Image (tube, grey):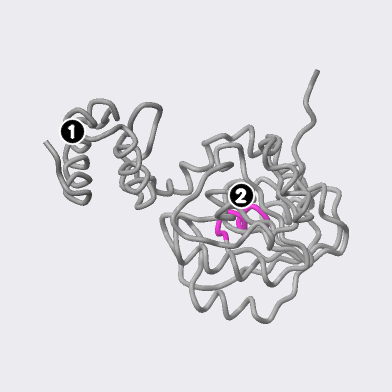
């Protein structure tokens, strides 16, 4: 049976929704076309985010959503702790920094005991409470500035026009931002558009933009673009960059920091 391209792709999606997976060779026989034609159809459907190609065929596209803050704290917790330690090593006495609302950036606060006279801006309610706790017990002697704005109760953060307006009045030495995806082609991305816009504002307000991202975020793209990799100065992760990225990262003058390999 032979169908026009759009009709064939519609039929492929119907089969995919029924079965969860389709095989290229079987589709070619079903529609009486070559496997090359089917692969082109699958390529086009993948570009439209309707499916994900796998070896020999395709599977249903999995729509991911951002977990709530309390869930994120426990996902890859050890990796985030390592990243927090490395990122804190970039902070110098007297710095003015932003620590955003990500669960990875939050870990930085645990490693500030030997830093003095810091000014920390944050849009994170948990980060605010943790900083206050450290200040009360004498392990943080700096200034805390909470960035006001519309509160997201699920993610315990603020964003939106009010928060963006507040950031217009500040210049910071370093911004530490968590992201949901890091891609060579698509830059750094977020699940949430409002968060992406606000994070972009944090990056542009800082002399040095630092992304903190565990291994699950690398080679990943989510829905809302924050910035190109050219806009980022440092990435701190628990793993080294993909080998095929290294030359391009060097050309961008983007520094990548990760724990040393143990031999």
Q: Nearer the viewer, mark 1 or mark 2?
A: 1
Residue 5 as seen in the image, left or right of residue 203: left
Q: Residue at x 60, y 62 (%)?
A: 227
Residue that label 2 marks = 184
Locate residue 26, reporting x and y percent: 23, 26
Quick one: label 1 or label 2, which is nearer the N terminus?
A: 1
Disc number placed over residue 32 in the picture, else none: 1
Q: Was residue 127 drawn as part of the magenta stretch in this picture? A: yes
Residue 57 as seen in the image, left or right of residue 98: left
Q: Residue at x 66, y 37 (%)?
A: 242
Locate residue 55, reporting x and y percent: 40, 27
What is the total number of numbered labels drawn onto the structure image?
2
Q: Is residue 23 above or below residue 96?
A: above
Locate residue 46, reporting x and y percent: 36, 45
Q: Quadrant of residue 118?
A: bottom right
Element assignment for label 2: loop
Which residue is nearer to you in this view: 45 or 155? Answer: 45
Q: Quadrant of residue 174?
A: bottom right
Locate residue 107, reporting x and y percent: 66, 45
Q: Which residues fall within the magenta stretch?
A: 124-131
Which residue is nearer to you in this view: 110 or 172? Answer: 172
Element assignment for label 1: loop
């Amino acid at each position: 049976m032979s169908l026009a391209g759009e009709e064939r792709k519609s039929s492929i999606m119907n089969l995919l929704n029924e079965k969860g997976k389709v095989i290229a060779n079987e589709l070619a026989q079903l529609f009486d076309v070559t496997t090359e034609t089917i692969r082109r159809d699958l390529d086009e459907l993948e570009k439209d985010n309707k499916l994900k190609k796998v070896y020999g065929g395709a599977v249903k596209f999995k729509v991911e959503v951002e977990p709530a803050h309390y869930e994120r704290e426990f996902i890859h917790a050890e990796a985030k702790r390592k990243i927090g330690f490395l990122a804190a090593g970039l902070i110098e006495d007297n710095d003015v920094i932003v620590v955003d609302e990500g669960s990875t950036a939050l870990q930085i606060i645990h490693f500030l005991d030997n830093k003095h006279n810091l000014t920390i801006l944050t849009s994170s309610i948990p980060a605010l409470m943790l900083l206050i706790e450290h200040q009360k017990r004498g392990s943080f002697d700096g200034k805390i500035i909470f960035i006001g704005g519309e509160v997201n109760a699920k993610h315990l953060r603020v964003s939106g026009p009010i928060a963006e307006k507040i950031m217009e009045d500040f210049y910071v030495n370093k911004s530490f931002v968590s992201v949901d995806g890091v891609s060579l082609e698509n830059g750094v991305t977020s699940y949430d558009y409002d968060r992406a816009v606000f994070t972009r504002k944090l990056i542009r307000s800082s002399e040095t933009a630092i992304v903190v991202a565990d291994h699950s975020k690398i080679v990943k793209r989510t829905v809302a673009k924050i910035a190109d990799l050219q806009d980022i100065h440092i990435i701190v992760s628990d793993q080294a960059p993909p080998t095929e990225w290294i030359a391009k990262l060097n050309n961008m003058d983007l520094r990548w920091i990760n724990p040393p390999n143990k031999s």
